[in-house]
Image: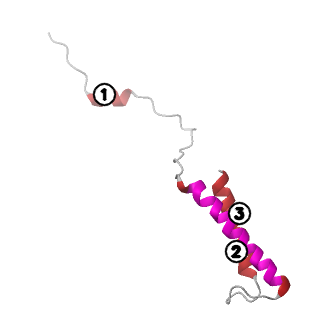
Amino acid sequence: MPVSKRSPRRRKDQRQAPPPSAPARHPRSPWAKRLGWPLVAIGGILFLMGQIGARTGIVFLSFDQHHIFEQFGGALIAIYGLIRATS
């Protein structure tokens, strides 16, 4: 009596699944670090523009008379870029 071949389905079922405790990690985009450092620079420049404007009275952005968006927005952009660039 000839021996039957095993079906491919059976081989897939016999593979072991990864342990449930292993976190599913997606590969990072190659643009993550390339985009991070320019964001740090842009955020730092925006923050410094806000600081200079608040001390001297110069208005760099016409919609931001009190330099709130320049300072806080620049700081947030710089921190976000630093997180992207270093992780």
Mark closer to the chain start, 2 or 3: 2
The mark lying in front, picked from 1 and 3, is 3
Inspect this view and state whether residue 52 appears: yes
- Image coordinates of residue 7 in percent, x first then y, are 25, 26
Return the mark for residue 10.
Answer: 1
Q: Which residue is mark 2?
A: 73
- Say if 58 sits above or below 76 in the image: below
Query: Which circle's residue, 1 or 2, is located before the other in the chain?
Result: 1
User: Which comes sooner in the sequence, label 1 or label 3?
Assistant: 1
Residue 79 is marked as: 3
**Residue type highlighted by circle 1:** Arg
| Mark 3 Cα shell of 10 Å, populated few (<14), some (14-19), many (≥20) | some
Could you tell me which residue is drawn at 53 percent across and 34 percent down? Answer: 19
Residue type for callout 3: Ile
The single residue placed furthest to the top in the displayed view is 1
The answer to which quarter of the image holds residue 23 is top right
